[in-house]
Image: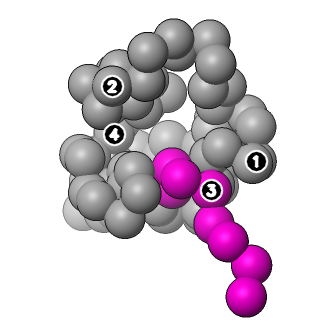
Amino acid sequence: MAEHPPVIVHPPTASGGRRVTIRGVIVGLAHGRGDVAEFLRRAGVEDPDDLTLDNPDQIEWRGGDMDHWPAPTG
C-alpha cells in the first residue's frame, strides 16, 4: 500500500475552503495557500522553506492543485 505525504489538502467544500490534515490530524480549513503555510508553521515546521507546497512527496492536493480555491457556493 502506497504511503500518503504527511500533509493532505482535501477537496474544496461548499464554503470554498479546503480541509488540511497533517499526519492524519485536521489542522484547519484553508482558504488559500497562505493558510496552508500558516498551518504548517503552527504545526512546528521549523523552516517553511524545507516544505514546498508543490512537492508531491510532502503535500497531496486532492480535488485541485494549490491554485484551485473556488468561490463559495450557495
Q: CA gap, disc 4 to disc 1?
A: 18 Å
Q: Tell whether label 1 touches label 3 (CB within 8 Å).
A: yes
Residue at numbered disc 3 = 5
Among the two numbered marks 2 and 1 on one chain, the one whose residue lies closer to the N terminus: 2
Q: Residues within 10 Å of mark 3 (few under 14, many from 20)?
A: some
Residue at 25%, 47% (x, y): give it: 27
Return the mark for residue 44. 2
Query: Circle 3 sits in a helix, a strand or a loop, which is it?
Result: loop
Q: CA gap, disc 4 to disc 3?
A: 18 Å
Nearest to the eye among marks 2 and 4: give it.
2
Q: Which range is magenta?
A: 1-9
Return the mark for residue 56. 1
Q: CA gap, disc 3 to disc 1?
A: 7 Å
Q: Tell whether label 1 touches label 2 (CB within 8 Å).
A: no
Q: Residues within 10 Å of mark 4 (few under 14, many from 20)?
A: many
Q: Tell whether label 3 touches label 4 (CB within 8 Å).
A: no
Residue at 76%, 37% (x, y): give it: 55
Amino acid at dot 4 = Ala
Position above or below: 56 against 13: above
Residue 46 is situated, as x and y percent measured from the top left of the image, at 44, 15
